[in-house]
Amino acid sequence: MTQRADVVRADKSHIKRIAELEKSCIPDGWSENAFEQALGNPNALIFAAVRGGEVVGFLNGSYVLDEAELLNIAVSEKFRKSGIAGMLVTAFEDELRKLGVKTVYLEVRESNAPARKLYEKHGFTQNGLRKNYYRSPAENAVLMVKMI
């Protein structure tokens, strides 16, 4: 069953919940303060997936000139496999196209099969590997790229 959400550009009112989601999904991820600082960066793109007034997912990325990086994405556990992550990736790519971005990069834990499947579904391909990039636990990062 697909559960829809509205995808919006995040603002200060979304940051606390985004940071909570980040911590629940990526324990050594960004802090609330880091997300607040990113909001002030004109090259940052943070999207929130909102359902029933609650932030149930987010995507954080940035761009410089014609290149972008998808930095982190998370969806509340009870809303996974509902299409929300795909909606966030699509919104990110749509905005990047408007900005003239041509290439998007990301890295993902080698063992994170659901995320890798999502990225491949959206046209990302593997273009490298960073040995022991992640901590807690130590793990390789799969590097992926997409031309948009």
Image (spheres, grey):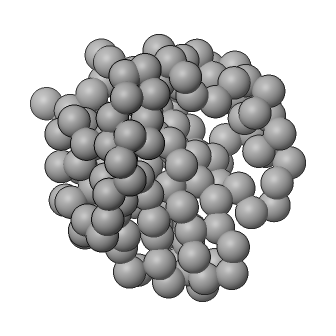
* Residue 83 appears in the picture as rendered: no
Q: Is residue 35 left or right of residue 71?
A: right
Q: Nearer the viewer, residue 12 or 24?
A: 24
In the image, residue 26 lies at what x, y percent? 47, 24
Q: How many marks?
A: 0
**Quarter of the rendering containing residue 147:** bottom left
Residue located 23% across and 48% down the image: 116
Identify the residue at the far left of this view: 1
Q: Is residue 139 left or right of residue 96?
A: left
Q: Is residue 30 above or below residue 143?
A: above
In the image, residue 105 lies at what x, y percent? 45, 65
Q: Is residue 78 left or right of residue 99?
A: left
Q: Is residue 9 above or below residue 11?
A: below
In the image, residue 79 lies at what x, y percent? 31, 24
Residue located 37% across and 29% down the image: 138
Q: Nearer the viewer, residue 105 or 13?
A: 105
Which quarter of the rendering shows the N terminus? top left
**Quarter of the rendering containing residue 67:** bottom right
In the image, residue 109 lies at what x, y percent? 32, 40
